[in-house]
Image (cartoon, rainbow, N blue to C red):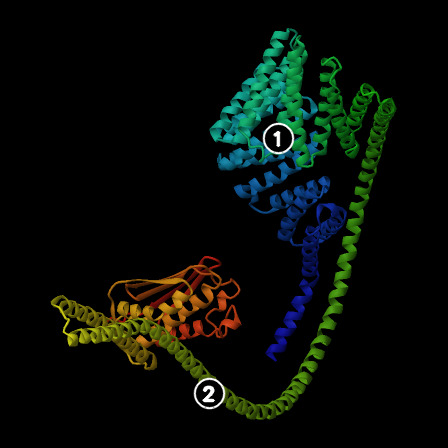
Amino acid sequence: MKAYTVLLILLIGFYLNAHGSSDTTQIIETFNKAQNFRIEKKDSALLLLRDCYNRLNQNPDVNFKKKYYSKLAYSFYGYGDLKTSRTCFNKTASLILSEADSVNTIVNISKTCDYYENCGKISNTLSEFGEARKYFNKSLHLIDSIQKTKKKETHSLNANKGSIYNNIGTSFLNEGAFDLALENYQSALSTYESILDTAGIYNSHINIGLIHWEMKNFEKAAIYYNKALLMAKAQNSNNSISACLNNLGILYYEKSQKQQDTVYEKTYIDTALIYYKKSLEYISKESNLNYYAGTLVNMGIAYKEKAKLSCEKSIQSDLFNSAADLYVEANDLYASIGNINGVSLTAGNISALYLTLYDLSGQKDKSLVQESVKYGLKAYNAGKEIHALSRVEEASHQLYEAYEYLGNYKVALQYAKEYIIVQDSMFFKEKTEAVAEMETKYQTEKVQHKNEKLEQQKLLDQETIARQEAEKKKQMYAIVGVLLVLVVVIVFSIVLFRQFRAKRKAYDELEIKNEQILEQKDEITAQRDQLDKALITLKSTQEQLIESEKMASLGNLVAGVAHEINTPVGIGITASTALIEETKQFADTYRTGKMTKTDFQNYLQNMYDTGNLISKNMQRTGNLIQTFKQISTDQQTEESREFNIKSYFEDLIQSFSREAETKKATIDLHSEDIVINSYPGVFALVLSHLVSNSLVHGFRNTEKGIISIKIEKKEKLQIQFSDNGNGISHDLLPSVFEPFTTSNKQLGAGLGLNIVYNLVKQKLNGDIRIESIIKAGTTVFISIPDCSA
């Protein structure tokens, strides 16, 4: 019964939380679904986010609401619904402040200030500058309250204050209230200086410089831009340094436009160009193509204005060409990143410049007009693509002039008509936009008035709905109580019935499984007997293969030794035959009595030399036979003994000389005298297979091969066998030690390296690995544990 009591408690708890938790789950799922939509499908995403917002307004969980109002705020902002984003930020801040002791928590104050500041920034974006300052002042009030009550001047709170002052200054700047903007920017600067915030000081200097610029006070603007430049250099920020230098360039260019004296105007333009060029030195073209192209455009404008100030046509032409080159480079950069607006702007300027250069040339160089047409068309098409009527107007006018210069009056007339049409549409658009603006303003005021009435009605409706909901809940709880009792009784009955049925079913299944186990036992026994037989057969086959490989190796050894013995035996036979013939001649000379002392001495000397030659070759033959006996015995027995591995390998290499000569290959051995106690027959088989593998496969279709064997004795006996042959393909290399792996079935069964692997691993307890490069050769590394004699 304890289990059913727990079940009843769980059911009651489940009911009490079902509505809230299911709604919470649905909000989370809907929110996550909205995040999966790309910006192109923002309408679908916004529908889901607004559903989340409406559900969240009804959710009773305060902590959950705080978390998801904040998330929704950032999501609405990302999808472009700025007003709802601001509402969510505001609600998050209000919920944090409504909690007990939250005002005394610096972390919460900092978060709330961020939310209010975000509300202000959004209001600035919506051009609601007065509303923006209300939110910014809320943030300032919160910071001041915590600093007064706690007497804490924390770095983070002061950093927030500096940011808020800057934002308030921006709102006044956008309204044209330069004096109030300057006052707040100065407050931001003082705040940042008190906490030595270099980034904040830099931004404040930039903002104050901008105010003085707008007020046409170029000297003061230059002072603050230079201060910002010093801060940027202190931070070692190339991007900030470049931005400051670019701003100074623009400042001096604008200052040049205010001069009446052409000398001063030229001076300020030259100063602007110096700053532009320095700006480009501090930024990589690849890191910010838009910015780099923009600076090139600024330089182009400066060169163009400087050209207009010159009286000499040659100087004018050079300066206009310099401007054109800069515009062309900027145009290419804009095109590479798909900035259609930049392409339209620069192409239009280039087209106009080439027409100017054509006029300067005395209207002789038609190629300049062709270039003007080329870039005029670019400007025209780009302007059409982004619906920039002013750009289309300028490009149409330039194309009209260019085609007229080229004598193509038909096309010139076409662009002249386009120029007039665009001019008229621009005038109509301005008038239409003015009327639309007045209509929008009227409709907005009308909607706001209507919304105020609806808000009042909504409050009354909410009170009525709340009373109705409370009454419904009382009725629902009574009904639920009765239903819960019924549910418990039904569940109890179902559980008892299922337990009985489950036990019966389990008993039947157990009987069936017992019968299956008995049947499987007989099958497993039969399969095990078959596997034992297969294993015995496999072992027997493996032993037969190894024995056949041993015999094949022994056959190769016999053939090699026979070749080596053939030469000394042949020399011995030849020498003994010559000795017999000379003895016969000496006997004839002796019988006739014609023998002289000289003949006798010559015969004795020849006897000595020939006997010595026969002796040496017979001795060589005996040594070869002795080596053959030793090696063949080693290969046929598996007994360990002491032997000098260097000498042993030299004897083995000698037996391979005939095969090596056939392949025009040489075998080099590099080893010190190392005496070990091991299985010489195993070493013989290993070396035999490796040499055979190199000669048969490695040096196939090669002119000359080299086999190098290096033996070292460190902690282990290290043997490195390498050749400069064809190498092993990447496909075969991973399985090269597996049976029947071969690059050519006609040249062998593919068991050699498998036997080598088994002998090294099993008989010598060593390790073996192989490396190979196609057309460069193969190297086998063998490592054998200490087997010192």
Which residue is more in the foreground, 502 or 460? 502
State the image coordinates of residue 653 (x, y, percent, origin top left): 33, 68
Query: Who's the residue at 53% across and 34% down the image?
Result: 159
Marks 2/1 in contact by CB < 8 Å: the verdict is no
Query: Who's the residue at 49% across and 66% down the image?
Result: 734
What's under tag 1, amino acid-wise?
A: Tyr
Q: Residue furthest left?
A: 597
State the image coordinates of residue 609 (x, y, percent, origin top left): 19, 68
Give the image quarter of residue 119.
top right
Q: Left or right: 661 with respect to 2?
A: left
State the image coordinates of residue 256 (x, y, percent, origin top left): 63, 13
Which residue is more in the foreground, 228 or 340? 340
Query: Is residue 262 placed above or below 527 in the rendered structure?
Result: above
Query: Is residue 506 placed above or below 604 in the rendered structure?
Result: below
Q: Nearer the viewer, mark 2 or mark 1?
A: 2
What's under tag 2, amino acid-wise?
A: Ile
Q: Left or right: 343 with respect to 655?
A: right
Secondary structure found at label 1: helix
Secondary structure found at label 2: helix
Q: Which mark is residue 291?
A: 1
Give the image quarter of residue 133.
top right
First in sequence, mark 2 or 1: give its number. Answer: 1
Q: Can the viewer see residue 412?
A: yes
The residue indicated by pointer 2 is 536
> Where's the N terminus, which quadrant?
bottom right
